[in-house]
Amino acid sequence: ARLSVGLLFGGESPEHEVSIVSARSIAAHLDPARYDVIPMGIARNGVWVLTGDPFARLAAGEQPERGPHPFLPFERGAEATPLPDVFFNAIHGAGGEDGQLQGFLEPLGRPYTGAGLLAMAAGLDKWITKRIWESEGLPVVPYRGLTEEGWARDREGALASIQPLGLPLFVKPANLGSSIGIEKVKRFEDLAPALDRAFRFDRRVLVEQGLEVRELEVAVLGGDDPFVSVVGEVLPAGEFYDFQDKYLDGRSTTRIPADLPAGLQDQVRASAAAAYRALDAYGMARVDFFVDRPTGRLFLNEVNFIPGFTSISMYPKMMEASGVPYPELLTRLIDLAIKRFQQRA
Ligand code: ADP
Ligand code: MG
Ligand code: MG
């Protein structure tokens, strides 16, 4: 039977535009013999755009008013929209990849692609993610976590606790992505101002030892015994893989598969599956690693549960290189969504 697929895209995060591109790609590759695509845009102001051509309306930057019901974020005139058989979530970052959308979809009683609320919320939080991985004995880069109140109460103590990490340092808001708010700090006198800036983005901030790294990525697909792709490598153009490089000038290059000794490949792929399971992931994830160049040591960096998803993004390319072409990947994600939903019912 044909399935109606509610394709969710846009959203309130800075990855709004990226999500539109990801979703256009998904819509173009969903098998028309099996699926009816219903585009469902979320405008920058959080209002769900469900009428007319949501792709065109979001691309034009439309931000319609909310409809009459004060509890619901839908635009006026969307009352007659039917519930799709399954939701396909292509919303990156805050709102789509942090558990909020999952919590909103749960009571609708329809399957949705990707992981559930718990994994999403934990996975977008770099501090919680590290604590879970550490508790499983998985290697993470040495770090300190700070809260805004702790920082305000005892700046000297906080700086002293960070000192042993050495230099350079990476300062990161706990709950963002796309390198937003991330700073590389090369001198201790620059640390306090960098922390002040990071706390404008989030109540909780991480400070990590800055390594000289190779950046490896792996695509994971499935449930508790997932399929793991070949390993890919990103070679950033600048000092680190920042927002500019990711989305604006795209000067970084990629290698799939990465040129790695066989032993390291296996270690990366096994760690990716363990990292995935530890977070109760489901559906898909891109798991990102660092290899410290001087020592050759492998560290988990972070996980992305709604990674860039255009047909030329890393996740689909790594899957493709591992024998899962893009249209099949979409079908597998939908099948997994339905399987997870049935298992819970
Ligand atoms: P985001 O979720 O925004 O992608 P990341 O933690 O992946 O955040 O950091 C973005 C980029 O910053 C990484 O891809 C890498 O280039 C650089 N980076 C982050 N942490 C470190 C670190 N500890 N050592 C060296 N480079 C880092
Ligand atoms: Mg990220
Ligand atoms: Mg990253």
Image (tube, rainbow, N blue to C red):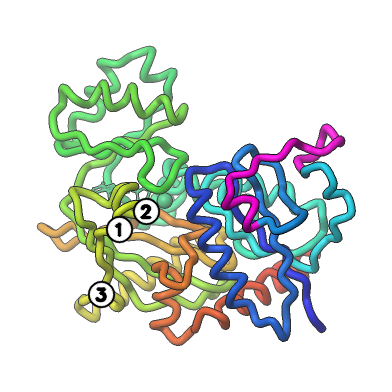
Q: Looking at the image, is 132 positioned above or below residue 205?
A: below
Work out which residue is located at the far left of the displayed protein and give it: 294
Task: For marks 3 and 2, give the CA distance.
Answer: 22 Å
Question: Could you tell me which quadrant the C terminus lies in?
Answer: bottom right
Labels 1 & 3 near each other (Cβ < 8 A): no
Q: In the visual, does 175 lie left or right of 81?
A: left
Q: In the visual, does 161 lie left or right of 90?
A: left
Mark 3 is surrounded, within 10 Å at the Cα level, by few (under 14), some (14 to 19) or many (20 or more) other residues, namely some
The residue identified by callout 1 is 250
Mark 1 vs mark 3: in front: 1
Residue at horizontal 45%, vertical 30%?
202
Of 54 and 36, nearer the camera is: 54
Of 20 and 330, nearer the camera is: 20
Over which residues does the magenta segment extend? Answer: 55-74
Labels 2 & 1 near each other (Cβ < 8 A): yes
Q: Earlier in the sequence, mark 1 or mark 3?
A: 1
The residue identified by callout 3 is 258
Question: Image quarter for residue 12?
Answer: top right
Whether residue 265 appears in this view of the structure is no
Q: Earlier in the sequence, mark 3 or mark 2?
A: 2
Element assignment for label 1: loop
Main SS of the magenta part reads loop
Element assignment for label 3: loop
